[in-house]
């Protein structure tokens, strides 16, 4: 029974929101980093950025947070 529940949890697609912290985002999937680098977020290694929400980071870089969330969630769903 526990094995079935574990398999179900592994098959669930992770999703992020505007409130997801950058540090959490990279824990969900480190392969998201190139998406962030591609839009100019080169501060991923900065300790302060780890506690910044995806929405805050997007706004600082002049990016629509909803579009970024959609792009990341589409990426995660495709894995």
Image (cartoon, rainbow, N blue to C red):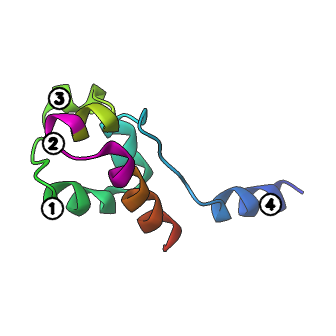
Marks 3 and 1 sit apart, C-alpha to C-alpha, by: 20 Å
Mark 3 and mark 2 residues within 8 Å of each other at the beta carbon? no
Q: Which residue is mark 4?
A: 3
What predominant SS class does the magenta segment belong to? helix
Q: Earlier in the sequence, mark 2 or mark 4?
A: 4
Residue at 40% from the left image edge and 50% from the top image edge? 69
Q: Earlier in the sequence, mark 3 or mark 1?
A: 1
Residue at 21% from the left image edge and 46% from the top image edge? 63
Q: Secondary structure at mark 2?
A: loop
Q: Does residue 74 appear to the left or right of 46 in the view shown?
A: right
Marks 2 and 4 sit apart, C-alpha to C-alpha, by: 44 Å
What mark, if any, has residue 47 been given in the picture?
A: 3
Marks 2 and 1 sit apart, C-alpha to C-alpha, by: 13 Å
Report the span colored magenta: 59-68
Q: Which residue is mark 2?
A: 62
Q: Earlier in the sequence, mark 1 or mark 4?
A: 4
Toward the viewer: 2 or 46?
46
Q: Does residue 21 appear to the left or right of 63 in the view shown?
A: right
Vertical placement of 31 versus 23: above or below? Answer: below
What mark, if any, has residue 51 been given in the picture?
A: none
Marks 3 and 4 sit apart, C-alpha to C-alpha, by: 37 Å
Q: Secondary structure at mark 4?
A: helix
């Amino acid at each position: 029974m526990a094995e079935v529940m574990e398999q179900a949890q592994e098959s669930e697609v992770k999703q992020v929101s505007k409130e997801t912290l950058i540090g959490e985002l990279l824990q969900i999937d480190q392969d998201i980093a190139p998406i962030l680098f591609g839009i100019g977020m080169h501060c991923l290694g900065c300790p302060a950025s780890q506690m910044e929400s995806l929405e805050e980071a997007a706004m600082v870089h002049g990016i629509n947070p909803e579009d970024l969330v959609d792009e990341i969630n589409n990426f995660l769903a495709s894995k």
